Image (cartoon, rainbow, N blue to C red):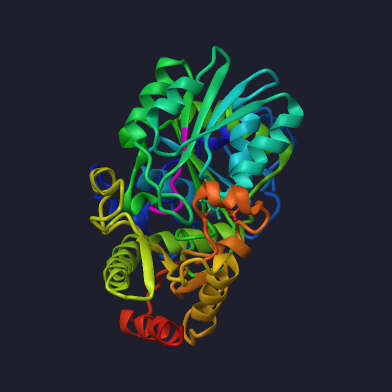
Amino acid sequence: MAERKIPRKALPAGLGRDTLAVREGLPASAWGENSEALFLTSSFVQPDAATAAARFANEEEAFIYSRFTNPTVMMMERRLAALEGTEACIATSSGMSAILLLGMGLLKAGDHVVCSQSVFGSTVALFGREFAKFGVETSFVSQTEVGEWRAAIRPNTKLLFAESPTNPLTEVCDIRALAGIAHAAGAGLAVDNCFCTPALQRPVEYGADYIIHSGTKYLDGQGRVIAGAICAGENVVNDTFVPVLRSAGMALSPFNAWVVLKGLETLSIRMEAQSARALTLARWLETQPAVERVFFPGLESHPQHALAMAQQSGCGGAVVSFIVRAPRGDGIAAARKNAFHVIDSTRVCSITANLGDTKTTITHPASTSHGRLTEGQRMAAGITQGMIRLAMGLDDVADIQADLARGFAGL
Ligand SMILES: *Cc1c(COP(=O)(O)O)cnc(C)c1O
């Protein structure tokens, strides 16, 4: 795909990731802008008919049409690839459309997928229901039991799909072990890196082949746009994903790409600050009598704490979940009432299911993100009615503690 071979920006070799986060992209335009330009254009003017023909035939490198080539989108792709440590990246209109593109590119009828049962709810629906319509079968296995992944492999298994840490329980999978299982079976491993971002975890260093992003979360980082991406090798991006994107059209808008591009500039300092604040909050939550259990990879009490600390840098991400204590035997109604009370007592936290924002967000997974599951499915997944998920932003920790303490005091 010649149109993906646009010249690289002239940067010295061996730059650090923080520098790449603010500088990787494309050469500046004729005007020499310092901040990256927003090319809000659907198409690009061709100098003459013969050149247009050559460009459409991929014989010459140039931008043609923003469904599959746009300079602002390409700058975001190059910057994100540099941060993830992959050769290439392809941006999509949302995190879900990145997973759709992954499936459409890699799978065909008769293929089999092994997927963690703890992945994002829409990912479960996409593999389990939508791809099944096209003859792709998916087995769902435990996020943390490597043996279950190995046992689920079949001769036609083409893809393993995991997310680490998961939402809302922050379960961590062993990326290196899963990559080993995938590659031994001639399959690929995709990891949804939404919660950690490349600032804290680079799955490619542990053998993952495809890194999935919902740019909607920390990459934008301020809750403004919906965006997604797949980071992977150059050949698979150019030969497998670009043709599907060109035909299927799950393209990222240049405006949204520009917002994410600028968000990437502050990603590492935001992730460091937000995960440090989340750890402080998680430790405090563990001391609260009103709290039964805290889920956060940075806590020594987390079942995969050692693995998380080996696979990630920072303090364990910025998402903290916890269960509010309810009187024994009072059942799920009391547990939900207490959780709702704590959420409704906050004055600073935003009550919203989104995460990855500088504004701290709080939500009740059992009635929102996981509200479509049956109570039995929720119990199996460990998402109880007393559980609250908090995504720490850049608010002062003391203000968030005061917010939660108000609710705890009223129980
Ligand atoms: C939000 C989310 C997605 C989906 O991303 P959208 O941009 O909302 O489509 C996928 N995976 C994870 C882990 C998410 O949190």
Q: Quadrant of residue 368?
A: bottom right
Q: Which residues are magenta?
A: 190-196
Which residue is the extreme one toward the front? 329
- Residue 123 at what x, y percent from top left? 60, 44
- Residue 69 in sight here: no
Number of numbered discs on residues: 0
Q: Please give the name of the residue rendered at 60% of the width and 47% of the height, measured from the top-left corner.
A: 377
Q: Please give the name of the residue rendered at 35% of the width and 81% of the height, measured from the top-left corner.
A: 401
Nearest the camera: 23 or 312?
A: 312
Give above or below for 162 relative to 41: above
Nearest the camera: 286 or 149?
A: 286
Give above or below for 353 relative to 301: below
- Residue 136 in sight here: yes
- Residue 410 at what x, y percent from top left? 45, 87
Nearest the camera: 105 or 334?
A: 334
Q: Quadrant of residue 84?
A: top left
Judge left or right: residue 298 versus residue 343: left
Give above or below for 380 relative to 342: above
Q: Please give the name of the residue rendered at 27% of the width and 49% of the height, measured from the top-left corner.
A: 305
Q: Please give the name of the residue rendered at 24% of the width and 48% of the height, measured from the top-left corner.
A: 309
- Residue 180 at what x, y percent from top left? 36, 23
Nearest the camera: 394 or 19?
A: 394
- Residue 329 at what x, y percent from top left? 51, 66
Which residue is the extreme one toward the top? 155
The N terminus, quarter of image: top right
Is 257 inside the magenta-drawn segment?
A: no
Judge left or right: residue 43 versus residue 198: right
